[in-house]
Image (cartoon, helix red, strand yellow):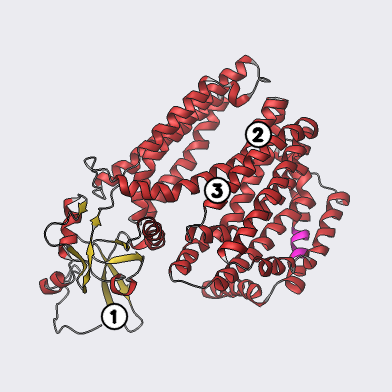
Amino acid sequence: MKATGIVRRIDDLGRVVIPKEIRRTMRIREGDPLEIYTSRDGEVIFKKYSLMGGLDDFAAQLCETMSRSTGAICAVTDRDSVIAVAGGAKRELLGKGITAQLEQVMENRRIYQYDGQGPQIPVSDSSDRLMAIVAAPILSEGDLLGLVLLALGFFLAAHPQMVFGTKWAPEELALGAKLLRIMTLNAALSFPFSVFESHVNIHERYLFLKAVTMAKSVLSPLISIPLLLLGFRSPAIATLSLVLTIVCGLTYMAYCFAVLKMPVSFRTYDLPLMKNMMGFTFYIFLAVVGDHLNYGIGTLMTTWIHGAELSGVYYSANQLNVYYLSFAMAISNVLIPRVHRMVAEGDSNRELTRLMTKAGRLQFIMLMAVFLGFVAVGRPFVILWAGGKEQFAVDYPVALLLFASTIVSAIQFVGLEILRAKNMHRFRAWVYLAAAAVNVGLMIPLCKYGGLVGVAGSILFITVVGNVLPINWYFRRHVGLDVRWFWVRIARLLPSMLVPAIVAVLIAVLAPVSGYLDILIWGCVFVAVYAASLWLFGMNRYERGIVTGVLDKFRRKRRRRA
């Protein structure tokens, strides 16, 4: 910082005037938000707040994609400076202020394209070498996806046999079609409403977001339970979900227009930009479709072959795996910004492999704890969870097989994110779709003759053979990651899990469990054995440091309270 020699006094309301000269130099306009920082030296620092500040990683990813597609230098700016660059000239542009001409382009909210006549617009105040060829303001558009889902969903609802098979009774088919229409409308409306939710998120109004989300979470059971007690069936619950989606969406919309003054324009539609974005996101979409087909086809297959009752049993096991998958994504989701930053800054594949290995080992430790814990007390848990119905005991082996497939894929989530960051995720998308197609063919005989266990076994087999093996080959051959080093470090954890695995089996076979209290007691016994074994024989210095750091932080908090 440098002193300006300007002194201003604070008035009785705590306000201070920023001199006009500084506002002009720093391009601080009337109504612009300012962030306030404090330093250890007692300094109070004002900094211009950027609405694009939290999107650095996404902006870098977008720039990289557009640069590879067009062969030009691509940049993303906020209203004042360049926040991401790809294709070269990073030192000249990144963090530099933009010209007044580009500011005017943004204010006009129209796409600028140089036509070869007249002077070009320079990008940065600090350099005249780089000129703008195309400049497009970032606007909010997104209604089209909702319409596509709406059409597809109602087509399937008009032909319920395609979804639910022929085993269902006519009244069950009619109910399923009605539910499908309601859920399709719910999904279709969520897309345009998500634009407004994202706008609130970009402005970092987290308190408002949490308030709306919490209100929806609280209202849903509070209204659903009285409806069920009054004799209403599942269509009423689905309709309630639709109503809450509409109410929350309208709340976000009103907040964006009334509080955030969100600008909306339907006059321009940037087809080249949409084409480049779709080229990147299309393969992400294919991968998501393939992943959902692999795990979701089991419910449909069970419905077609065995009917609605057994399908409900499988759904319970699959729902447990959904919770397990959400738990598995906790570490990898935290590391997503770091992965994209490392790729954007040109970090070596060796460093990326180390990050992938650290995250993979932590995920393996956490997921195996839940997996072996489920081995110990999973059977009585699923029976109690299903209301004491013994037919749900089959969920125990089914859930274990699904958990195993999740472990195999989840420990490499960071590697998959590296593919996205490097814009090398096309191969993964096609592999996932091919695996899903093979899974459908394999699951038909396995479901018919092996029941629910056959369905889960098919998913596990396809995950390992059709997913992990080709993806790891691609990691090594084309991406440059040292997957052998990765798997060796993962395998070093296995000896430390031998004793906990034996204890889990002994608890499952010998321990008397008759209620949730018994499950809690034996679960605590297993956790103690697992933690001790991992600490003594499995964890490295880095992983032990994480544990001790958490414990030290907890002790400091207790001391402060005392």
The quadrant where residue 294 appears: top right
Tell me the distance, in whole angstroms, between the alpha carbons under discs 3 and 2.
22 Å
Query: Is 512 on the left-hand or right-hand side of 166?
Result: right
- Crowding near pointer 1: few (<14 within 10 Å), some, many (20+)? few
Are dots 2 and 1 in contact, CB under 8 Å? no
Can residue 112 be seen from the camera position used here?
yes
Question: Closer to the observer: label 2 or label 1?
Answer: 2
Determine the secondary structure under disc 1.
Answer: loop
**Disc 1 marks which residue?**
43
Compare marks 3 and 1 and give the one earlier in the sequence. 1
Q: Is residue 183 above or below residue 436?
A: above
The residues bearing labels 2 and 1 have C-alpha atoms spaced at a distance of: 60 Å
Q: Type of residue at label 2?
A: Thr
The span picked out in magenta is: 524-530
Between residue 113 and residue 170, name the one nearer to us. Answer: 113
Position of 350 relative to 108 (above/below) = below
The percent coordinates of residue 479 (x first, y second) are 56, 63
**What is the crowding at mark 3: few (fewer than 14 residues within 10 Å), some, or many (at least 20)?**
many
Which image quarter: residue 388? top right
Looking at numbered disc 3 in the image, what kind of residue is underneath it? Ala
Q: Is residue 528 magenta?
A: yes
Picture coordinates of residue 387 (x, y %)? 71, 35
Residue under the image location 62 percent in, 43 percent down:
434
Q: Secondary structure at mark 2?
A: helix
Looking at the rendered image, the quarter that the N terminus falls into is bottom left
Question: Split into 4 quadrants, where in the image is the C terminus?
Answer: bottom right
Label placed on residue 299: 2
Camera-nearest label, 3 or 2: 3
Q: Which residue is mark 3?
A: 429
